[in-house]
Image: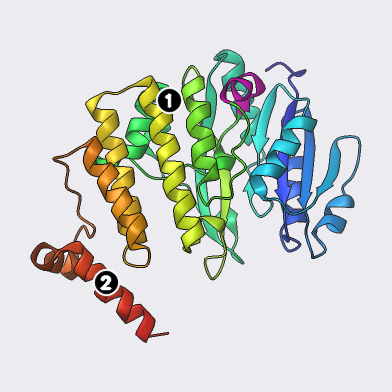
Amino acid sequence: MDEKALVSVIIPLYNAEAYISECIKSVLAQTCPNIEVIIIDDGSTDNSAALAETFASSEVKLYRQANKGASTARNYGLREAKGKYIQFLDADDLLSADKIEAQVGLLEQNPGCIAICDTVYFDDGTDPYQNKPVKEWYSNGFNEPVDFLIKLYGGDLIGPNYGGMVQPNAWLTSRHVIDKAGLWNEMRSPDDDGEFFCRVILESEGVCYAPGAVNYYRKLAGNKNLSAQKDQEACQSKLTVTDLKAKHLLRKSDSDKAKLALSRLYWENAFAFYPEFKKLAREAEIKAKMLAPHLRIRAYSNGLKSFLSKIFGWKSISYLQYLKGNFSK
């Protein structure tokens, strides 16, 4: 590995006083010899910024902005970053000590590619290091960009074990690829990372897997993670992100598999939005059918709900489930 290859770790920070110190320590414990840490406080109202400032040094810099959202904070970080490689890290998550070094080694050997690693999901308040990552389908070593996204979006429609999610901290990306892909879309969205890394993947030469490297993703109590939001603004932004993903992928490939994979994303939107946001659900359903007119996906894969949805339709079952949830509150 080129010891001169600087890695910029960009941490957007907002009201994470319970976690930011542990997060920074996991970066400072990296075996990679050349790292700068760029923390962007996004208008925190707790003690987060003060805690982060205790780590300030020539390698750890803290910047402040009014509350504008994580994507805006990440773009601020990119403007300040000097590294050849970029590691994004959420303020409540952690990295294994060898994560960055392992991925830099891969990228030095595979210029133009981006690196991915395993993720351990752990509940807040538990020891993350007691858990082992589940090996995902992309752990086979190397994936071509379009093929990677088709497998990620298409899931079991493309083949067994495909699909899932990739946490943003799992990536390490060269600054060159990011410059080609463009900055983060600053629209507030539960899937802002999905849209950004869709562009990054498509501008890369491929996705390389780093065995042994781990990203630790904290699951917060009460679904406080941004990705768990379900209000009208969040759902509208999810649909907008799906539109953008479709635009990006279809620009590179309009194959039947690409359209099938994107149709699945729209169906997932429709299932998630109904019945609270019927207009958005209908829009997603129409777009799904336009891409793959003959595709029909079950809202419920098994059990009683799956059986009843075959008789009464998935919308009826979703509506009854929604009513049951409201009555039980």
Report whether residue 30 is seen: no
Which colour assignment does the render follow? rainbow
Residue 24, horizontal then vertical, whole percent: 76, 47
Q: Position of residue 113 (x, y in %)?
A: 53, 19
Which numbered dot is residue 319?
Answer: 2
Residue 262 in sight in this render: yes
Q: Quadrant of the C terminus?
A: bottom left
Residue at horizontal 77%, vertical 28%?
A: 33
Q: Picture quarter containing residue 161?
A: top left
Q: Residue at x 33, y 31 (%)?
A: 150
Q: Amino acid at mark 2?
A: Tyr
Three-letter residue code for mark 1: Gly
Q: In the structure shown, which secondary structural element does the residue marked by tag 1 occupy?
A: loop
Left or right placement of residue 17 versus residue 60 in this view: left
- 1 or 2: mark nearer the eye: 2
Q: Which residues are magenta?
A: 173-181
Quadrant housing residue 173? top right
**Badge 1 is on which residue?**
141
The quadrant of the picture occupied by the N terminus is top right
Q: Residues within 10 Å of mark 1 (few under 14, many from 20)?
A: few
Residue located 89% across and 45% down the image: 56
**Disc 1 to disc 2: CB gap under 8 Å:** no
Q: Earlier in the sequence, mark 1 or mark 2?
A: 1
Which residue appears at 31% of the width and 79% of the height? 323
